[in-house]
Image: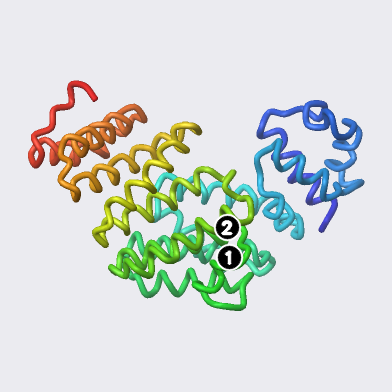
Amino acid sequence: MDKSSFGTLFKFVRMGKGISQSELSYGICTPRTIYNIEKGFNTPSIELMLHFANKLGFDFLSILSYSNSENGLLYYKTFQAMEKFYESADFHSLEKQVDQLLENNTDLSPYQYQILHWYKGICIAALYRECEGARAEFSLALSYTREFGVEEAARHYCTIQELHILNSYANILHLEENYLLAIDLYRDILNNLSRYGKNSNDPLFVKISYNLAKSLNKMNKPREALTICQAAILLAQKNNILNSLAELFIEKGNSHDLLGEMEERNRCFKRFIYLHELCGNHESIREKKARFVEKYGLAFDNV
């Protein structure tokens, strides 16, 4: 680790969160300790790093990966921008940035190469519908930290980043209608999250639960899907994860539809529309709302 590069990155993250040196140090060290870290005089212990990561909301392995390069801060900002492209589904911009980094940089860390190939696989799937190419990129991404295959990796301790890659791989299996394989992989990911105490990463837990329920419904297992949905809905409500909560309600509605429970189905579909409108996603759900009106005769005056 380059102390100076780490200190610069650390200060950038802290200031970006609007937290002072005194606030960050409270109860565990002195403000002078933070000052020395940011000036590149010292590096924090593992205990301090975990405290800082929890308080600032970052993955400390990620910060360490950037601090090995003199371009660490530039790379950090670039990867932050790519994360925003990913979250907003701007896959054209994401692919352009990924290709540029892969072509023009040689001092990236394995962690950063892993993220780039994960993003590349996502872009291939989203823009070109090339499932085989996407799977190859996800396998390559995983190979930067694993020596064995996807299915075996999910049964061992995985980082959160590795679990995101495994989830993307399972999504491709779902798209290819390999629902049994997708279900097994989603379950392994959820078990990994729970087994190693990562279920505090609630957004990922909710996302995987939704994906699992979707595949279970495709296999005509609506009761099992309902159980999965309900547990994830409670978690999403607790953490105010509204977009994921909306998707869970449509999958719960699909389960009720398979069971012939039309009143519950309609209630779930209306809740789905309401939550998306609450998030301001009016344009993106207009077509689906019209389909619900036409197919099920739903009215959306109230939910």
Q: Is residue 138 left or right of residue 272?
A: right
User: Considering depth in this image, is 86 or 158 the residue closer to the camera?
Assistant: 158
Element carrying mark 1: helix
Q: Is residue 33 left or right of residue 297?
A: right
Kindly report which numbered mark, 1 or 2, lies closer to the viewer in this rendering.
Answer: 2
Question: Amino acid type of disc 2?
Answer: Gln
**Vertical placement of 25 versus 78: above or below?**
above
Q: Do residues under tags 1 and 2 come within 8 Å of each other at their CB atoms?
A: yes
Q: Residues within 10 Å of mark 2 (few under 14, many from 20)?
A: some
- Give residue 141's quadrant in the image: bottom right
**Vertical placement of 85 versus 296: above or below?**
below
Q: Residue at x 58, y 65 (%)?
A: 114
Q: Quadrant of the C terminus?
A: top left
Q: Is residue 279 left or right of residue 45?
A: left
Question: Amino acid type of disc 1?
Answer: Gln
Q: Residues within 10 Å of mark 1 (few under 14, many from 20)?
A: many
In the picture of the structure, the residue carrying the numbered disc 2 is 161
- Give residue 170's quadrant in the image: bottom left
Q: Earlier in the sequence, mark 1 or mark 2?
A: 1
Where is residue 174 drawn, in percent x and y?
33, 64
User: Considering depth in this image, is 155 or 32 the residue closer to the camera?
Assistant: 155
In the picture of the structure, the residue carrying the numbered disc 1 is 114
Where is residue 277 drawn, in percent x and y?
30, 29
Q: Is residue 244 left or right of residue 63?
A: left
Q: Residue at x 34, y 38 (%)?
A: 246
Q: CA distance from mark 1 to mark 2?
A: 9 Å
Element carrying mark 2: helix
Q: Quadrant of the N terminus?
A: bottom right
Where is residue 6 drawn, in percent x and y?
79, 50
Q: Residue furthest bottom?
A: 148
Q: Residue at x 70, y 40 (%)?
A: 54
Q: Which numbered marker is on residue 205?
A: none
